[in-house]
């Protein structure tokens, strides 16, 4: 479908939206499964509850993930995502574009990243290490408020071909 697709609130078992060109926007989505694809145009999703797969061939992606897992893919365009305490695993990949990920400070997670051409900036750099076999990768366990410091229920994986990765605390 060409043209802008916009919705205020969507609730269903499965939500699937595909756009050929034009922006796709929804202020709230609640579903067991969410699949959003855009060939050419940005995607802006607020307050997503459910397992989400979001991809854009050419255009930026903005996602506010409240609960469920997220798989975000962009061929050409930046990705900006905010993840809540209730969110699950997060996987972000861009071929060409920067990634900004905002996380709550109390979140516990296993972190891995790789950028072929770009920088990595996190508030938990001291918790990361670079494997000897791959200096462009960084990995680590971030314990959030967990006193034991070695337990994380979720995985966060970010890969960029050409673009920087920036992770921020939200609160």
Image (tube, rainbow, N blue to C red):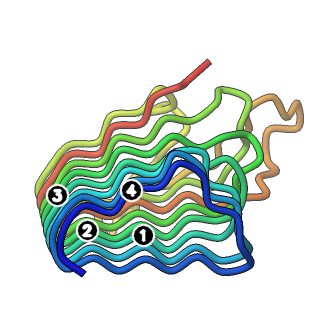
Residue 15 picture location, percent across and down: 58, 76
The kind of secondary structure element at disc 2 is: strand
> Badge 2: how crowded within 10 Å, few (<14), some, or many (20+)?
many
The kind of secondary structure element at disc 3 is: loop
Residue at image position (25%, 65%) is 94
Q: Earlier in the sequence, mark 1 or mark 3?
A: 1
Residue 162 picture location, percent across and down: 11, 60
> Which of the labelled discs sits on residue 74, or is there none?
2
Distance from Cα at disc 1 to Cα at disc 2: 8 Å
Q: Is 157 displayed left or right of 161 in the figure? A: right
> Which of the labelled discs sits on residue 6, or is there none?
4
Q: Are marks 2 and 3 in contact (CB under 8 Å)?
A: yes
Q: Earlier in the sequence, mark 1 or mark 2?
A: 1
Distance from Cα at disc 2 to Cα at disc 3: 6 Å
Q: Earlier in the sequence, mark 4 or mark 2?
A: 4
Residue 55 picture location, percent across and down: 34, 72
In front of the other: 62 or 22: 22
Q: Which residue is mark 3?
A: 77
Q: Earlier in the sequence, mark 3 or mark 4?
A: 4
> Which of the labelled discs sits on residue 54, or is there none?
1
> Badge 4: how crowded within 10 Å, few (<14), some, or many (20+)?
few
């Amino acid at each position: 479908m060409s043209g802008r697709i916009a919705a205020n609130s969507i609730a269903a078992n499965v939500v699937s939206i595909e756009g050929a060109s034009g922006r796709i926007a929804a202020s709230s989505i609640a579903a067991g499964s969410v699949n959003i694809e855009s060939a050419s145009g940005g995607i802006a999703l607020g307050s997503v509850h459910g397992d989400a797969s979001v991809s854009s061939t050419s255009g930026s992606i903005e996602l506010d993930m409240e609960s469920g897992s997220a798989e975000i893919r962009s061929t050409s365009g930046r990705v900006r995502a905010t993840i809540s305490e209730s969110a699950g695993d997060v996987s972000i990949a861009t071929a060409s574009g920067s990634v900004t990920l905002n996380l709550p400070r109390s979140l516990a997670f296993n972190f891995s990243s790789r950028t072929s051409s770009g920088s990595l900036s996190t508030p938990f750099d001291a918790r990361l290490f670079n494997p000897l076999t791959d200096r462009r990768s960084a990995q680590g366990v971030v314990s959030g408020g967990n006193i034991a410091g070695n337990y994380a229920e979720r995985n966060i994986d970010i890969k960029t071909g050409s673009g920087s990765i920036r992770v921020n605390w939200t609160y």
